[in-house]
Amino acid sequence: MAKINKEAKKKYFERIAPYRKSINELKDKDNRIEGILKGNDAGEPYKRLALADGNLTVVSYFLVMNSLSVSLLGVRNENALNDAKKACSLAIIQLEKVFTDLVDVPFSEYEEALKATASFNEMKRYELVRKTGLALSMVTGSFAENNKWKWAMVDLDARLAAVAKNCLDLKTLVQGMDPRNEGYRERIEFFNLSRKLLQDAADNYRKKYELTNKHMDDFRKAISFLGALQRLSMLLGRQNEAVNLKKKSEIWKKKMESDQKNSEDASRLRRLGGGSES
């Protein structure tokens, strides 16, 4: 059995060698681009988009390395998966630098960032957001069910949701919803994907709040993503939807304020020596 394991490892390392080489080449290329970006570069947004795409390619290589480990060795390659998660994060960081990471704010606050990539049209933006979402989904699905990165992946998904929303040109979105316009189907898909990502981010941050350490920041983020959803509904004239989202936000805010007060009261009692640990 030991001999078979040794042979399997040898075969595995032979199989992943080309992927390691490609990853190193991409990292060298990224380092050169980052070096250029330290100066003033008029094409900075487009170079950052290239960096994001390069990191997604790196993610795919690490996922292949993990799949080969499972098939040839019978175990996950946790290092490859961790590196895939890091590459996802690096890709999203680049997208945030281009499109901003703003959530519940008016379009005017991030409109200029969208204008800076005018030639990277909405279909290209949609494709890049979808590609990033697929990478995140595949990395999440490759980890064990109860892995230590569960909530970290929720954060990455939420950050992508903000980017996806910020990739929508809200000044032309409504007109583009006309079925007679070119790209209508893709535009609707992009809009629906963005809404789903925002809703998932709100729900998952609320879940994270309830199931972990009840950090108020997670609850605030959940409410912020609901607010972003409400803005989109109002833009499209979906009044009932906007009203329901507003009501939901208000309920969540009251819950958050109540929990915060209870937490502060409990802390005060402990400091005074009049509380008991529950």
Image: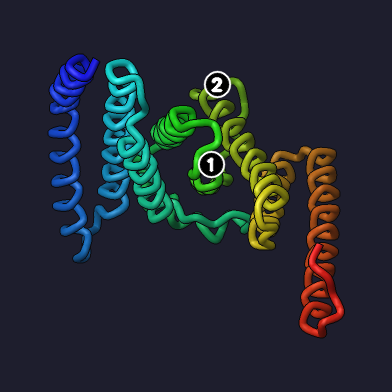
**Which percent across, then down, holds residue 256?**
79, 60
Q: Which residue is mark 1?
A: 150
Residue at image position (30%, 49%) is 48
- Residue 137 appears in the picture as rendered: yes
Q: To which residue does mark 2 refer?
A: 185
Q: Residue at x 43, y 52 (%)?
A: 96
Residue most extreme to the front: 1
Q: CA distance from mark 2 to mark 1?
A: 33 Å
Residue furthest out toward the bottom: 272
| In this rendering, position of residue 25 left or right of residue 251 | left
Task: Note whether 203 is above or below 270 in the view shown.
Answer: above
Label at residue 10: none
Pinpoint residue 137: horizontal percent, then vertical percent: 48, 31
Residue 213: percent from left, percent from top: 66, 57
Q: Are marks 2 and 1 in contact (CB under 8 Å)?
A: no
Check disc 2 and report its element: helix, strand or loop.
Answer: helix
Q: Nearer the viewer, residue 242 or 247?
A: 247
Quarter in which the C terminus is drawn: bottom right
Measured along the vertical axis of the image, is residue 278 above or below residue 133? below
State the residue in front, 245 or 265.
265
Q: Give the image location of residue 182, x and y in percent.
A: 49, 23
Q: Which kind of residue does numbered mark 2 sit on?
A: Arg
Of 239 and 1, nearer the camera is 1
Residue 214 against residue 266 in the figure, above or below: above
- Look at the numbered disc 1 and give the secondary structure of its residue: helix
